[in-house]
Image (cartoon, rainbow, N blue to C red):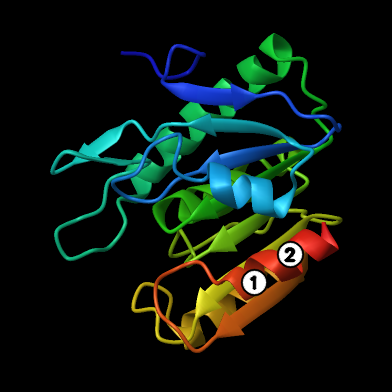
Amino acid sequence: MANNDLSRPHLFQKGNSARTLLLLHGTGADEHDLLGLAKALDPDASYLSPRGMHLEAGMNRFFERYPDGTFNEASIDQSVAELAEFLEAAIIEYQLDPQEILAAGFSNGANTAAALIVKHPELLVGAALFGSTKPYRDVEKVDMTGKRIWLANGDMDPYAPVAASEAWVEELKGFGAEVKWLRYPGGHQISHAHVNQIASEL
């Protein structure tokens, strides 16, 4: 099945402002999973939430990973290309402001959002990344001037080691992005304090 149009399962809720939050769920969830997060981040925004189309042991994901947990970068590329085409179709169908789309994702979805913004920076104004790490081993230098990124991780998150997060933040800053690294002494979950802080800064 082609996933590059609006036929992929997704949810859209029209908001009261120009902003759209592109919601990208974590492994095993679906397009309904992050609605609570979206409302907490910006109750007035429109919400666009596509389902990850890769299945791993029956669980929805946006891209494939190998048995040892490392990412299949070819699968990331395919997922990001399909997601970019979906987003472009949604902009037309739902009459979205293309200059006001911000991604918000958790875990696999956040890694996908990070890949999307480095591959297609023109599609997003920024990204709120929860429980996330660098999606590619090597990222080609890209102009991310003016992009706003929040990397919100727990210091005990096994999927987002602190040293790797620190290096990723510096790399994104080197691309010109405005990056905030939010940390808390927890694991692989979304911190309410981080949500509240990002909401106050949007």
Locate residue 188, reporting x and y percent.
39, 72
Identify the residue position indicated by label 1 in the image.
194
Residue at (30%, 51%) from the top-left corner?
A: 72
Seen from the viewer's position, the closer of residues 190 and 161 is 190
Quadrant (top left/top right/bottom left/bottom right) for the C terminus: bottom right
Q: Quadrant of residue 57?
A: top left
Number of other residues with Cα within 10 Å of mark 2, as a class: few under 14, some 14 to 19, many 20 or more: some
Residue 170 visible somewhere in the drawing: no
Which of the numbered marks, if any, corresponds to residue 57?
Answer: none
Q: Quadrant of residue 160?
A: bottom left
Q: Amino acid at mark 2?
A: Ile
Which of the numbered marks, if any, corresponds to residue 198?
Answer: 2
Seen from the viewer's position, the closer of residues 200 and 27 is 200
Q: Secondary structure at mark 1?
A: helix
Quadrant (top left/top right/bottom left/bottom right) for the N terminus: top left
Q: Secondary structure at mark 2?
A: helix
Locate residue 168, reporting x and y percent.
58, 73
Q: Amino acid at mark 1?
A: His
Q: Is residue 121 left or right of residue 30?
A: right
Q: Check contact, mark 2 vs mark 1: CB within 8 A.
A: yes
Residue at (75%, 48%) from the top-left corner?
A: 42
Locate residue 127, reporting x and y percent.
67, 53
